[in-house]
Amino acid sequence: MASMNRTALVTKLHKVLKKYYKPVPPVERPVLEQLLYACLLENAPYQPAEEALARLSEMFFDWNEVRVSLVRELAEAMPGLPQPEEAATRLKRALQGIFESMYSFDLEHMRKQNLGQAISKLQKIAGSSSFVVAHVTQSALGGHSIPIDRAALEVLAIFGTLTNQERNSGQVAGLDRAIPKSKGVEFGSLLHQFAAELAASPYNPQHHKVLLEVAPDCRDRLPKRGAKKKEPPQPAVPQKKPVKGPVAAAPKGIVATKPGALAPTRPGAPAKPAVKAPVPGKGRDKPAEKPAKVVAKAPAPKAPSKSTPVAGPKKKVIAARSGKPKPR
């Protein structure tokens, strides 16, 4: 959109948000604590971020102990944040970057430096996002910069005022000129409150009402519940037509049981005859034949072996055949 259209839309957004929200004034803190608070406030409401900073100050001895603690331990100390692990990662990286660049946790000297020089140093600290730098510039260094986090970018994207480059970098060109410095803190807090609530419940009709009141033509870009994806139709598997005519000879070890089906058998084993299924309507009136009884036969007598001694009668027969009289 053109610069004038963006300026007019941001001005109208400020006017509409004042009807539904109250501005949150900044709290006086040291520069270091403002930076750490901004790490917790990004994509989160004000009250949970305040409570998380207070709990960290009570549970840990100093900020160096927070720096060397695990992300999981820090996240457990901030249960009220919508994304505690992400906030803990930003906080830990920022403390590590400050310690490696300055070997201390004192940033008060930035108040005495030129604003551009101080902002340049903030940008070089590892873990300092554009939202963190803008928040410290506005609340601690007295500069004019509107903090824009990912939730606020989504609000401006619904209005269609962002380019892809601005959405990726997190910096909206012309926003500081559209809102004067005297109203920068007020507009930043109003936008942050609305963006955090919209991120927590994107389908709330009340939030959609506020968006449509600012830009009635953004209805097509409102968050919508994703419809269930329909699975693409599966391609039909072509069925093989039965082969008509004589069945091809089966290879060795395979016995054809019926046309089109081959059953493996052991080599050399006789093929089993196929069992015919009963034909419906036939043989219903005939009684089932009873199986014939098997009568056990007596075992046949065994023939005497040659080693068995011959009984008396057998000797008489031999003597008679010899022709000699048997002595008495």
Image (spheres, rainbow, N blue to C red):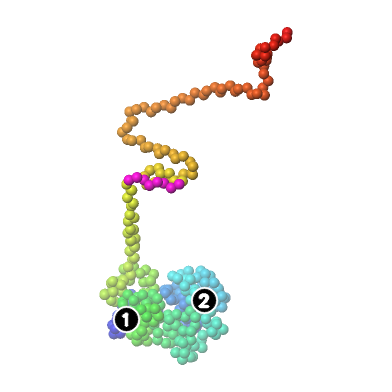
Q: For the residue carrying disc 1, how many other residues have a C-alpha within 10 Å: few (<14), some (14-19), or many (20+)?
A: many
Q: CA distance from mark 1 to mark 2?
A: 34 Å
Q: Nearer the viewer, residue 151 or 289?
A: 289
> Where is mark 1, residue-wise?
10
Q: Is residue 39 above or below residue 143?
A: above
Q: Residue 95 at what x, y percent from top left?
A: 52, 79
Q: Which amino acid, by three-letter code, is at mark 1?
A: Val
| Image side of residue 259 versus residue 114, left or right | left
Helix, strand or loop: magenta stretch: loop
Q: Nearer the viewer, residue 245 or 31?
A: 245
Q: Residue at x 34, y 60 (%)?
A: 231
Q: Quadrant of the C terminus?
A: top right
Element class at badge 1 = helix
Residue 146 in sight? yes
Q: Which amino acid, by three-letter code, is at mark 2?
A: Lys
Q: Residue furthest front?
A: 323
Element class at badge 2 = helix
Q: Quadrant of the N terminus?
A: bottom left
For the image, the number of numbered tags is 2
> Where is mark 2, residue-wise?
92
Q: Nearer the viewer, residue 48 or 9?
A: 9
Chain part drawn in magenta: 245-252
Q: Nearer the viewer, mark 1 or mark 2?
A: 2
Q: Quadrant of residue 142?
A: bottom left
Q: Quadrant of residue 217?
A: bottom left
